[in-house]
C-alpha cells in the first residue's frame, strides 16, 4: 500500500507587502490582491502580525483580511504580543489562530522566542474562551516546551532563526548547524509525546524548508520575509509555488 506524503500547511505572512505600501503612504501594492494571489498560488493560510507600533499591517488590514478569508474558509493566523489591547482585538475578530510572540519596539524583527510563564494563563484562557486556537512562538528549549504543555495551548511554533543562521553561515552538517538542528528535532519529539501541534518559522528559505519538512510531525510553517523578497525576482505567486514544492519534496 502506497504511503501518503504528509501535507505541511504553508502559512504565508504578508506583513512586508504592507511595509512596501506604507513606504509611500499610498495604496500600492494592494494587500488584498496579495492575499488573493497567495491563496491562488497554494498558501494554506495567511499570517499577519499586528504590532503595537503598527509598522507593518494596520487594524483595517487585519479586519479586511479576516473578512476576506472567512469567505474562503482559509485560516487567518494573527501574530500578536500578549497585551490587553491585542487580546481585546483578537477576541473581537476571532481569527481561527493566534500566535503569541514577544515584541520589542526597537527590534527589526522578532529576535527570540516568547518567555513562557504562568503569566500567559489569563490571556490564553480568554482566547480559548473565544474559540481561538493558540500557538506560542518559542525557542527550541525544553523548559519553554514543558510550560507550553502545562498551559494547554494547541501548538508551538519553534523559532528556527538560530538554526537558519547556522545553516547559512557554517553550512548544512556543520557542528553549530547540527546542534541547533537537534534542538528542533527534540522539540518535535516533545510535541508528539504531549499532543502539542508542532509548527516552525523564522528565517526559512527553500533549502531549510525542504530539510525541516522531513521532521516527523511538522504540521505547519509560517514564512513571510523570504517570500516577499523572492517576489522581487520571480513574482509572489511563483515564490509561493516554489516553497510549496520544497515542502512537498522534503516531506516525502
Image (spheres, rainbow, N blue to C red):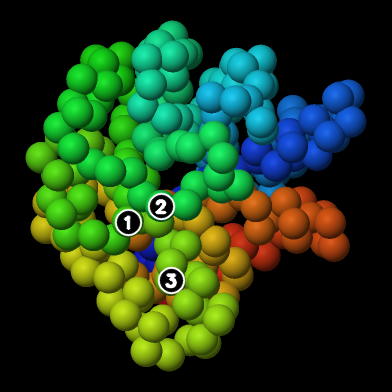
> CB atoms at circles 1 and 2 under 8 Å apart?
yes
Q: Position of residue 247 (x, y in %)?
A: 52, 66
Task: Choose the circle earlier in sequence order: 1 or 2.
Answer: 2
- Left or right: residue 204 versus residue 125 is right
Classed neighbour count for the residue bearing mark 2: other residues with Cα under 10 Å, few (<14), some (14–19), many (≥20): some
> CB atoms at circles 2 and 3 under 8 Å apart?
no
Q: Farthest front residue?
A: 106
Task: Choose the circle earlier in sequence order: 2 or 3.
Answer: 2
Classed neighbour count for the residue bearing mark 3: other residues with Cα under 10 Å, few (<14), some (14–19), many (≥20): many
Q: Nearer the viewer, residue 111 or 30?
A: 111
Query: Relative to 59, is 8 above or below?
Result: below
Q: Position of residue 212 (x, y in %)?
A: 42, 70
Q: Secondary structure at mark 3?
A: helix
Which one is closest to the eye, mark 1 or mark 2? 2
Quadrant location of the C terminus in the rendered image: bottom left
Q: Position of residue 179 (x, y in %)?
A: 32, 80
- Residue on which disc 1 sits: 139
Q: Which numbered tag is attached to residue 112?
A: 2
The residue lying at 85 percent from left, 62 percent from top is: 233
The residue lying at 46 percent from left, 37 percent from top is: 103
Task: Choose the circle earlier in sequence order: 1 or 3.
Answer: 1
- Residue on which disc 3 sits: 163
Which one is closest to the eye, mark 2 or mark 3? 2
Quadrant location of the N terminus in the rendered image: bottom left
The image quadrant that residue 6 belongs to is bottom left
Query: Relative to 86, is 153 above or below?
Result: below
The residue lying at 51 percent from left, 72 percent from top is: 165
Q: Is residue 150 visible?
A: yes
Q: CA distance from mark 1 to mark 2?
A: 7 Å
Q: CA distance from mark 2 to mark 3?
A: 12 Å
Q: Nearer the viewer, residue 122 or 94?
A: 122
Classed neighbour count for the residue bearing mark 1: other residues with Cα under 10 Å, few (<14), some (14–19), many (≥20): many
Amino acid at each position: 500500500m502506497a504511503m501518503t506524503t504528509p501535507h505541511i500547511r504553508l502559512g504565508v505572512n504578508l506583513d512586508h507587502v504592507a511595509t512596501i505600501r506604507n513606504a509611500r503612504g499610498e495604496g500600492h501594492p494592494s494587500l488584498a490582491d496579495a492575499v488573493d494571489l497567495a491563496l491562488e498560488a497554494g498558501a494554506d493560510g495567511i499570517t499577519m502580525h499586528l504590532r503595537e507600533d503598527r509598522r507593518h499591517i494596520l487594524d483595517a488590514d487585519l479586519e479586511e483580511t479576516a473578512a476576506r478569508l472567512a469567505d474562503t474558509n482559509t485560516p487567518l493566523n494573527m501574530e500578536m504580543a500578549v497585551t490587553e489591547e491585542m487580546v481585546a482585538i483578537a477576541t473581537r475578530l476571532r481569527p481561527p489562530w493566534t500566535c503569541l510572540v514577544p515584541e520589542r519596539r526597537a527590534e527589526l524583527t522578532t529576535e527570540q522566542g516568547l518567555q513562557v510563564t504562568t503569566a500567559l494563563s489569563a490571556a490564553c484562557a480568554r482566547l480559548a474562551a473565544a474559540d481561538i486556537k493558540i500557538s506560542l512562538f518559542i525557542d527550541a528549549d525544553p523548559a519553554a516546551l514543558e510550560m507550553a504543555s502545562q498551559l494547554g495551548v494547541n501548538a508551538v511554533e519553534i523559532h528556527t532563526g538560530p538554526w537558519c543562521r547556522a545553516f547559512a553561515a557554517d553550512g548544512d552538517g556543520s557542528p553549530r548547524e547540527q546542534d541547533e538542528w537537534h534542538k528542533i528535532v527534540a522539540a518535535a519529539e516533545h510535541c508528539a509525546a504531549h499532543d502539542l501541534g508542532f509548527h516552525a518559522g523564522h528565517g526559512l528559505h527553500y533549502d531549510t524548508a525542504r530539510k525541516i519538512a522531513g521532521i516527523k510531525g511538522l504540521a505547519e510553517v509560517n514564512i513571510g520575509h523570504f517570500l516577499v523578497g523572492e517576489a522581487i525576482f520571480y513574482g509572489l505567486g511563483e515564490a509561493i509555488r516554489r516553497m510549496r514544492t520544497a515542502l512537498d519534496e522534503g516531506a516525502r
